[in-house]
Image (tube, rainbow, N blue to C red):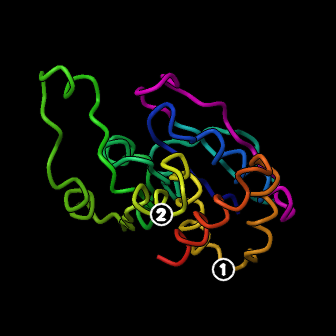
Amino acid sequence: MTKNIMIVGVGGQGTLLASKMLGRLLLNEGYDVKVSEVHGMSQRGGSVVTYVRFGDKVASPLIDKGQADFILSFEKLEAARWLSYLKEDGQIVLSDQEIDPMPVVTGAMSYPENLIEKMEATGAKVDAIPALQLAMEAGSVKAVNIVLMGRLSRYFPEIPEDSWMAALDAVVPPKFKEMNEKAFALGRAY
């Protein structure tokens, strides 16, 4: 049975590192894994999405609408933007952060209100955490991605925490290891 995870966010937030870590973890756990390239405006501020699919045998890296088991979102509006891809019983794990898209920055639009409540009203299960605050507590605003990985790990009780740590250590530079391990632990424990 194939599982589908979408990682969505804004360029410059570390979505690529998160998808690399997840891909490494799942390969190490013996799954066939397909990770798509990052799609979208990966320069700072643009919307980005990566698909991670895993199971016994995975043919394509792409996820269709209504097929995502998980949406891991680095920002509220991005979760709402990709909501149609979530399965009926799917789970959203998101940072409650708000990053203004260009139409909001220019004043053409305002940032939508009550996004979490609106997503929940569709029947989506939403696990929203203050990932930016937790990342700062760990030592860097850039650790939001690892805080979210820690939170996501709670939904995979069959994968030992040591395996997540090994995947983390494989993708982050040694000088940032301690800070990232703290970020992971804060996200997992929140």
Camera-side residue: 142 or 79? 142
Indicate the position of residue 103 as horizontal and vertical percent values: 21, 23
- For residue 157, the mark is 1
Indicate the position of residue 101 as horizontal and vertical percent values: 29, 30
- Whether pointer 2 and pointer 1 mark residues with C-beta atoms closer than 8 Å, the reply is no
- As drawn, is 44 to the left or to the right of 78? right
Q: Amino acid at mark 1?
A: Pro
- As drawn, is 19 to the left or to the right of 95? right
Graded by Cα atoms within 10 Å as few (under 14), some (14 to 19) or many (20 or more), the crowding at tag 1 reads few
Q: Residue at x 74, y 66 (%)?
A: 164
Graded by Cα atoms within 10 Å as few (under 14), some (14 to 19) or many (20 or more), the crowding at tag 2 reads some
Residue topped by disc 2: 137
Segment colored magenta: 26-48
Is 44 in the magenta?
yes
Position of 189 relative to 67 (above/below): below
- As drawn, is 181 to the left or to the right of 94? right
Indicate the position of residue 112 as horizontal and vertical percent values: 16, 43
Q: Earlier in the sequence, mark 2 or mark 1?
A: 2
Secondary structure found at label 1: loop
Q: Amino acid at mark 2?
A: Glu
Indicate the position of residue 31 as horizontal and vertical percent values: 82, 59
Q: For marks 2 and 1, give the one nearer the viewer.
A: 2
